[in-house]
């Protein structure tokens, strides 16, 4: 661990008066106080075989739990402060093993539940999720990452606030929830399965709340 000391301070020098000793202690503690005053809130949460980060800004993760199975999904609780897209960064924290045991391996099957608090001051009338293997680049059909694209009639997609959804797999991997509304200071739940048959160490989930167009 890095040790902080004021410039010119010698660990072998003894001061001749209590006043000098006090001044030296104050100077030594100032950098530590500065670090504490500017410490960032926690930005990385670990659940199952993955970590979840709000490091790209625009929203705040408040909790993460679960292992990623249908019975024990990965539950990410968030607060969004605007009606603009934000990006969740997802990284593996355990070895990658396709179809391995959930929680012990990043296995490419992630049952997800996103709980989102609308703290934007505006009602949201749609909510879209988009997967990206490379930040700001669409995840194409053949990369293996999708909202369960092999399943033509999914029964694991739903929301507490929206009645319908659409999925697009080319040229994007997108999941749009519609026919509903999330009022300010209300929370909505979104359930779906993310599949990645060629698992990567890092990928991204863009979240886009939509407001009325007029």
Image: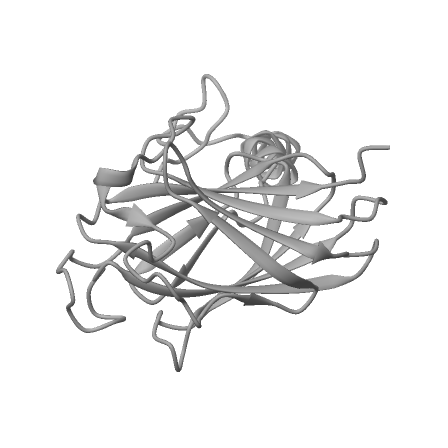
Assign the N terminus to one quadrant of the image. Answer: top left
On the rendered structure, is 194 left or right of 44? left
Colour convention: one colour
Q: Residue at x 34, y 42 (%)?
A: 203
Whole-percent x and y of residue 84? Answer: 67, 34
Residue found 61% across the figure and 29% down from its top: 20
Residue 144, position in %: x, y? 23, 46
Vertically, is 109 above or below 10?
A: below
Residue 3 higher or lower than 88, as above or below = above
Which one is nearer the viewer's eye here, 167 or 144?
167
Question: In terms of image quadrants, where is residue 27?
Answer: top right
Residue 97 in percent (x, y) is at: 12, 60
Quarter location, residue 48:
bottom left
Residue 99 or 39: which is nearer the viewer? 99
Q: Residue at x 30, y 57 (%)?
A: 195
Residue 95 position within the rendered picture, expressed as x and y whole percent measured from the top left: 16, 57
- The part of the image, by quadrant, that contains residue 28 is top right
Q: Is residue 75 left or right of residue 96?
A: right
What residue is shown at x 73% (from left), y 38% (from top)? 83
Give the side of residue 172 with respect to residue 109, left or right: right
Please determine whether, in this image, residue 92 is positioned above or below residue 15.
below
């Amino acid at each position: 661990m890095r040790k902080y000391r004021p410039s010119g301070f010698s660990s072998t020098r003894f001061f001749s008066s209590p006043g000098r000793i006090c001044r030296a202690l104050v100077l030594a503690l100032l950098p530590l106080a500065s670090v504490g005053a500017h410490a960032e809130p926690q930005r990385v949460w670990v659940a199952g075989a993955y970590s979840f980060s709000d490091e790209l800004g625009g929203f705040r993760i408040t909790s993460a739990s679960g292992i990623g199975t249908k019975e024990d999904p990965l539950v990410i609780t968030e607060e969004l402060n605007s009606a603009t897209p934000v990006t969740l960064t997802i990284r593996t924290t355990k070895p990658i093993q396709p179809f391995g045991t959930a929680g012990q391996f990043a296995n490419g099957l992630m049952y997800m539940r996103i709980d989102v608090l609308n703290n934007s001051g505006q009602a949201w009338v749609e909510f879209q999720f988009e997967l990206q293997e490379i930040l700001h680049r669409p995840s194409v059909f053949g990369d293996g990452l999708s909202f369960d694209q092999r399943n033509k009639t999914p029964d694991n997609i739903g929301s507490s606030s929206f009645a319908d959804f659409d999925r697009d797999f080319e040229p994007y991997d997108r999941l749009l929830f519609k026919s509903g509304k999330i009022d300010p200071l209300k929370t909505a739940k979104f359930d779906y399965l993310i599949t990645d048959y060629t698992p990567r160490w890092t990928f991204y989930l863009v979240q886009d709340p939509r407001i009325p167009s007029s």
